[in-house]
Structures are given as structure tokens and as C-alpha cells.
Image (cartoon, helix red, strand yellow):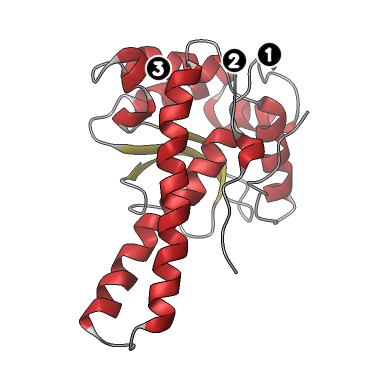
Amino acid sequence: MSYFVQEQLKPHGLKGISDDQIEEHWTLYRGYVQNVNGLLEELARIEPGSRSWAELKRRAGFEFDGMVLHEYYFGNLRTGVEPGRQGALPRALARTWRSFGEWERDFVTTAAMRGIGWVILYHDPFSGRLFNWWIGEHEANHPVGLAPILVLDVFEHAYMVDHGAGGRSPYVAAFLDNINWRVVEQRFVESHQRRLPNRFVVAA
């Protein structure tokens, strides 16, 4: 079974993140989908235990996580959605960080850390706790068993077209202005029900 590019997730008309930037970024995502399919086909052909097989096994997490994280990322972007101050998630954020604003400050500060990778708001469906987590590259430092609720790409390729190599700060501000809070709320509800959030859904 092959993986497919999820065209329904592609955002348009965002504030502060141009369609040209999205197009460039989308091309990279499409490459991850192709790489995952090619890698899985090769693994099915290669003798288990060989050097080539072992190298593909080591690459698998990078390619697969690169595909999946981009699907969560693009899926939580949309213009025209009101700030997420109502609903179960904002209340949970305020309980964890004392206020919505304090959560946002922690999220932005995490995104300003040196390095490339992702900032992810995770939910632990068993303890109910929320965490802003730094992920190195695509596959390093994921907390096992936690559900991704809000996903931010902080690789330079996410903002180079609009802001240049040093433009992470205005990019993160633009990201916050374009969060699809309906999708993010839905992910939180699904995780609260101990179901993995559906990364293919686009809320109206």
C-alpha cells in the first residue's frame, strides 16, 4: 500500500506566509512521500540483514516522520480562523501555563531555540498533560505515546522564500496568525478520547 500526497491539506492565501513559500515547501513534502514509498519498496526487495537493508532501516524514521509531520503542519494552517480562545484546548492550555498568553510565550520561546527541526504541542492522553516539545531534525526526541496537537516547522525551508535565512521570528508570528484552531481543537478532542489525531482532516 502506497502513501499519497494529501492535496486537501495544502493551504492558500495565508497572512504573512506567501503562496510561493507554501509551493516551495509543498515540493519538499511531496518528496518525502515519494521517498517513503521508494524506501518501503526497496526494503521489500533487499535481503534482511544486508548493509543496504540496514541503511534503509536507519533512514526510515527520518523519511517517514518528515512526511507525517508535514501533513500535521500543513493541516493546522488556514487563514480566517478566529484565535483559539474558546473550547477544551484553550482551557487546558490555561490550566497548564496559567493563561493562553503564557502558553503562547512558551511556544514561541521554544521555536526561537537554536537548531533545525520542529516545535510540537503534545498531549499525553493518559495524564492529560500538555507539553511544548522541541524535535531535532524529523525523528529525534519524540515523546513516545503522546499525540501531536499543533505542529510548527522551524527548518529554514519553511520561511526562506518570504523572510530569508534569519527570518524565523516573523515567520513564527505569521504561523500563529494562521493556525486552524478548529483542526487543532479536533486533534485535542481525539487525543483526549485516547485516539491518535487524524492528520488528513481539514476542518471547515
Percent from the top left, x then y, of residue 109? 36, 23
Percent from the top left, x then y, of residue 179? 59, 23
Percent from the top left, x then y, of residue 116? 28, 36
Residue holding disc 2:
13
Front residue of 123/129: it is 123
SS for callout 3: helix
Q: Quadrant of residue 71?
A: top right
Labels 3 and 2 touching (C-beta < 8 A): no
Labels 1 and 3 touching (C-beta < 8 A): no
**Label number found at residue 80:** 1
Mark earlier in primary sequence (1, 2): 2
Q: CA distance from mark 1 to mark 2?
A: 9 Å
Q: Is residue 120 above or below residue 190?
A: above
For the C terminus, the quadrant is: top right
Q: Residue at x 36, y 27 (%)?
A: 111
**Label number found at residue 171:** 3
Q: Is residue 136 visible to us here?
A: yes
Front residue of 132/43: it is 43
Q: Amino acid at mark 3?
A: Tyr
SS for callout 2: loop
Q: Amino acid at mark 1?
A: Gly
Q: Residue at x 54, y 11 (%)?
A: 15
Mark earlier in primary sequence (1, 3): 1
